[in-house]
Image (spheres, grey):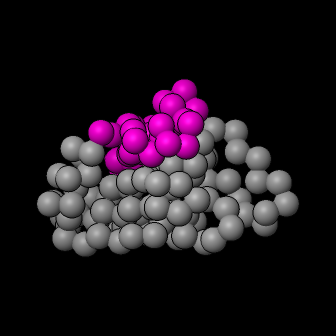
């Protein structure tokens, strides 16, 4: 089984990066890849509970992350959470917090890395 690491650095609204990262990671897990989705920088906002998309034209991705967490590993970077004033209580179910060790290992183990 090949390992795919998807790193999301962009916020969930204003650009399509977050939706595409979630779509690619979810699709890969359906095709017998071991997929890991890693949220870093403003990408951590993608895992925030109770998002109000307002009139952005974008759909909240929290429910998708909760569903996908049963199929793949999803991590949020601790330093990024701190930088954006988020903590574990602000995140949807299934998202784990990493201090960077998981990211290092995921990069080593991945046959493919996609950065959004």
Would residue 30 be visible to someone looking at this image? no
Query: Is residue 89 a member of the stretch shown in magenta?
Result: yes
Closest to the observer, 94 or 41: 41
Q: Relative to 99, is 84 on the left or the right?
A: right
The residue at the point 61 percent across, 59 percent down is: 12
Query: In this view, which residue lies farthest toward the right?
Result: 55
Residue 48: % across, % down: 59, 42
- Picture layout, residue 95 above or below residue 33: above
Where's residue 74, x and y in %?
A: 39, 47
97 horizontally vs 89: left or right:
left
| Vertical comparison of 40 with 23: above or below | above
Q: Residue furthest front?
A: 83
Residue at 49% x, 30% y is 88
52 drawn magenta? no
The furthest residue to the left: 108
Q: Is residue 42 above or below residue 84?
A: below
Q: Quadrant of the C terminus?
A: bottom left
> Does any portion of residue 10 appear in the rendered image?
yes
Q: Quadrant of the N terminus?
A: bottom left
Where, by quadrant of the figure, is residue 4 drawn? bottom left
Q: Is residue 43 left or right of residue 52?
A: left
Q: Quadrant of residue 15 in the image? A: bottom right
* Residue found at x 15% / y 60%: 109
The percent position of residue 42, horizontal first and vertical second, equals 53, 54
Q: Which residues are magenta?
A: 71-99
Q: Nearer the viewer, residue 40 or 111?
A: 40
Residue 41, given in percent of the width and then of the height, sits at 46, 54
Count the numbered circles shown. 0
Q: Residue at x 51, y 55 (%)?
A: 43
């Amino acid at each position: 089984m090949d390992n795919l690491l998807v790193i999301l650095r962009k916020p969930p609204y204003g650009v399509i990066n977050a939706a595409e990262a979630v779509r690619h990671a979810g699709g890969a897990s359906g095709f017998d890849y071991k997929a890991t989705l890693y949220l870093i920088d403003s990408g951590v906002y993608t895992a925030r509970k109770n998002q109000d998309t307002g009139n952005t034209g974008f759909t909240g991705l929290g429910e998708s992350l909760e569903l996908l967490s049963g199929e793949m590993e999803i991590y949020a970077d601790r330093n990024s959470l701190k930088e954006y004033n988020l903590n574990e209580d602000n995140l949807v179910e299934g998202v784990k917090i990493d201090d960077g060790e998981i990211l290092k290992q995921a990069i080593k183990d991945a046959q493919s890395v996609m950065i959004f």
